[in-house]
Image (cartoon, rainbow, N blue to C red):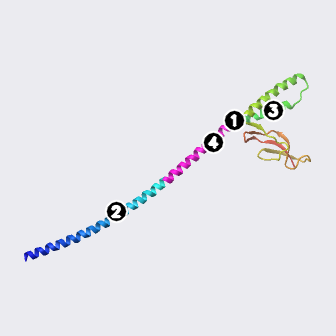
Amino acid sequence: MNEEAAQAAHDYTEDTSASENAAAESGEGNTSSSEGAVEDAELAKAKAEAEDYQQRYLRAQADFDNFRRRTLKEKEDFAKYASAKLVTELLPVLDNFERALATEQASSEAESFIKGVDMIFRQLGQVLEQEGVKPMEAVGQPFNPEFHQAVMTVDTDEYEEGVVVEELQKGYMLKDKVLRPAMVKVSG
């Protein structure tokens, strides 16, 4: 009987071990599949982060390129119009030269003086032209508030309405920028 009891106990232990091993093996299968799911989730999260970083990098690169272009344009504009302040201050001097040359002097002494002033005036005009300063043509042109400052309107049969009939003060451009609009009379 002891042998039978021992045999039964041994059989029971083997059955229990086998079922525990089977359960453990099936549990390992669950563990490995749950580990795979966790790894897949981590991989997807890492891919999403990588995509986010890639997009941020591309945006930063585009922002930097735009900054570089804008800075270069500002630098070019600064160099292009660096002399604008000086030239603007010289325009009244130019006007005074024109007025002085417009007055008539009768004596020969005054004539030689006027020739000297005229030479200085032309030299100043050449220097300003080399810097990109040009006088505007106003008389006979349609009135444009970007280039002309209307001081008064006059009735005339010579010009259509809205046309500059007389220039009271010259306007000047520095390259493609208005330094000073021309003061004009406009036909009404």
Residue 25 location (% of width, % of height): 27, 67
Label at residue 96? 3
* 4 vs 3, front mark: 4
Label at residue 74? 4
What residue do we see at 53% from left, 49% from top?
60
- Say what amino acid the circle numbered 1 marks: Ser
Label 1 – label 4 distance at C-alpha: 15 Å
On screen, residue 86 above or below 6: above
Residue 17 location (% of width, % of height): 20, 70
Label 1 – label 2 distance at C-alpha: 73 Å
Residue marked by disc 2: 35
Q: Residues within 10 Å of mark 3 (few under 14, many from 20)?
A: few
What residue do we see at 81% from left, 31% from top?
97
Q: Secondary structure at mark 3?
A: helix
Residue 108 location (% of width, % of height): 89, 22
Give the magenta range. Answer: 54-82
Residue marked by disc 1: 83
- Say what amino acid the circle numbered 2 marks: Glu
On screen, residue 14 above or below 163: below
> Which mark sits nearer the N-terminus, 2 or 3?
2
Q: Is residue 152 left or right of residue 178?
A: right
Label 4 – label 3 distance at C-alpha: 34 Å
118 magenta-colored: no
